[in-house]
Image (tube, helix red, strand yellow):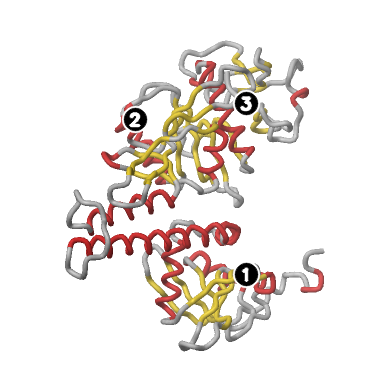
């Protein structure tokens, strides 16, 4: 049985959705004679049915031996539905049983971003798979620009090699599926060299884990021994700070004591402790900034993980201190950037990051537009109606390019500005 079917006129049907994903009702296909539906996997005829657990699905008239959808287990069926439900509850469009254009893979659940681009595959993996095969399939998704999270019910060797979750099926109907392994936090108490520290796996509802993954609040992290799990950037930074403290302290068997003068082991330990506190404060400030800028980062399509590199490029390119304000509706919902020309002087508005190109009709000539990629540059160039100063600050290549863009002639086929939006 499966959750999807194909109708010759209506297209793809998704059983769990109220409108079946095509504007039709379940009553249009359930127990209706003459409606012909086909399996998207093998093309065989399927019919609509409701299971004893009240799950709507499609079943084959004649079960073929070589169709994965026809022969999947009830556990696999229910786990796929739970993953799709969790993704939709997090505010994302999610489709079940989506095949790639090349036909070389089929995602159990494929999640799309606001621009309609596939961004994450959620795979219910209950059949055997080697770690090598898991890495290969993960790399195949990555080559298409799609992340993947593998979800299983039992501990398997491949779970250490790729981003995954191990979950428990709820005992009671309607209860939450629970993540038992795959989500981790770093604990360090107290935060000294002798304090107990280490990675611990946490238990949480599956819906929470999927929401954190899709919202970018957690990311895959490779820990000691090469094991991969999901965690927040703040925990990775904390683990790095702990490792730095250990590396900077010459007497590792001795706790950091009072300052004993420069050059002594106690003095070095105290200096390392101070560097640790500074690093932790900076990490907390970066985390708070990213949380404050979450809406803007989504608007600009900037990965939160590369934002610190972009912010550093702004400071490096200008050679001046820089501070970030909020998104400005008057500047196309771009992020305001303030700089200080000389010490002791006040900060003043100097640039805007990723303004909406439609706002470029009357742009302040003294402001610089900052963008993180050639894609954004092309959008700005196509929409410019006044001369612009643009800086392309690529956080991946660490390169900065400054351009002056001339105004583009108006499109003679476009409606007058007074009529736009009507």
Q: Nearer the viewer, mark 3 or mark 2?
A: 2
Residue 5 tag number: 3
Q: Sequence order check: which comes first, mark 2 or mark 1? A: 2
Which residue, given by chain and number where applicable, does mark 1 sit on?
Answer: 357
Residue at 59% over, 48% down: 116
The residue tagged with tag 1: helix, strand or loop? helix
Residue 94 in sight here: yes
Question: How far apart in space, not on screen, are marks 2 and 1 (Cα)?
Answer: 45 Å
On screen, residue 385 above or below 393? below
Where residue 158 is drawn, which disc sits there?
A: 2
Q: Nearer the viewer, residue 253 or 118?
A: 253
Q: Position of residue 37 (x, y in %)?
A: 66, 22
Please rate how many residues cluster around mark 3, counting C-alpha atoms within 10 Å: few if below 14, some from 14 to 19, many from 20.
Answer: many
Which SS class for mark 3?
strand
Label 1: how many residues lie within 10 Å, few (<14), some (14-19) or many (20+)? many
Q: Quadrant of residue 262?
A: bottom left
- Give the structural element (helix, strand or loop) at label 2: helix
Q: Position of residue 207 (x, y in %)?
A: 57, 34
């Amino acid at each position: 049985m499966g959750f999807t079917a194909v109708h010759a006129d209506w297209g793809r049907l998704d059983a769990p959705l109220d409108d079946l994903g095509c504007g039709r009702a379940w009553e249009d296909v359930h127990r209706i004679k003459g409606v012909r539906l086909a399996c998207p996997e093998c093309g065989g005829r399927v019919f609509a049915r409701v299971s004893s657990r009240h799950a709507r699905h499609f079943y084959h008239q004649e079960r073929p031996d070589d169709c994965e959808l026809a022969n999947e287990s009830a556990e696999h069926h229910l786990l796929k539905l739970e993953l799709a439900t969790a993704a939709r509850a997090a505010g994302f469009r999610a489709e079940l049983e989506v095949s790639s254009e090349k036909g070389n893979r089929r995602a159990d659940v494929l999640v799309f971003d606001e621009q309609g681009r596939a961004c994450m595959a959620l795979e219910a993996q209950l059949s055997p798979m080697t770690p090598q095969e898991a890495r290969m399939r993960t790399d195949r998704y990555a080559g298409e620009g799609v992340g993947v999270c593998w979800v299983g019910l039992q501990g398997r060797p491949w779970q250490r090699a790729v981003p995954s979750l191990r979950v428990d099926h709820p005992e009671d109907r309607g209860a939450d599926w629970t993540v038992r392994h795959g989500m981790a936090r770093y604990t360090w108490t107290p935060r000294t060299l002798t304090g107990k520290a280490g990675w611990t796996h946490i238990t949480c509802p599956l819906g929470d884990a999927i929401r954190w993954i899709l919202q970018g609040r957690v990311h895959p992290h490779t820990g000691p021994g090469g094991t991969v799990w999901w965690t927040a950037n703040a925990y990775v930074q904390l683990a790095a700070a702990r490792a730095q403290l250990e590396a900077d302290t010459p007497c590792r068997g001795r706790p950091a004591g009072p300052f004993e003068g420069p050059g002594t082991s106690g003095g070095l330990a105290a200096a390392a402790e101070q560097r640790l506190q500074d690093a932790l404060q900076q990490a907390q400030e970066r985390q708070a900034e990213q949380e404050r800028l979450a809406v803007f980062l989504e608007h600009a399509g900037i990965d939160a993980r590369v934002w610190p590199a972009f912010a550093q490029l702004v400071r490096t390119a200008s050679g001046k201190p820089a501070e970030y304000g909020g998104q400005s509706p008057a500047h196309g919902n771009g992020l305001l950037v303030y700089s200080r020309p000389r010490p002791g002087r006040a900060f003043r508005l100097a640039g805007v990051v990723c303004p909406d190109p439609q706002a470029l009709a009357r742009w302040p000539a003294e402001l610089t537009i900052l963008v993180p990629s050639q894609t954004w540059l092309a959008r700005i160039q196509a929409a410019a109606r006044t001369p612009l100063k643009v800086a392309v600050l690529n956080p991946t290549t660490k390169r900065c390019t400054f351009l002056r863009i001339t105004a583009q002639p108006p499109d003679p086929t476009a409606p007058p500005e007074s009529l736009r939006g009507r």
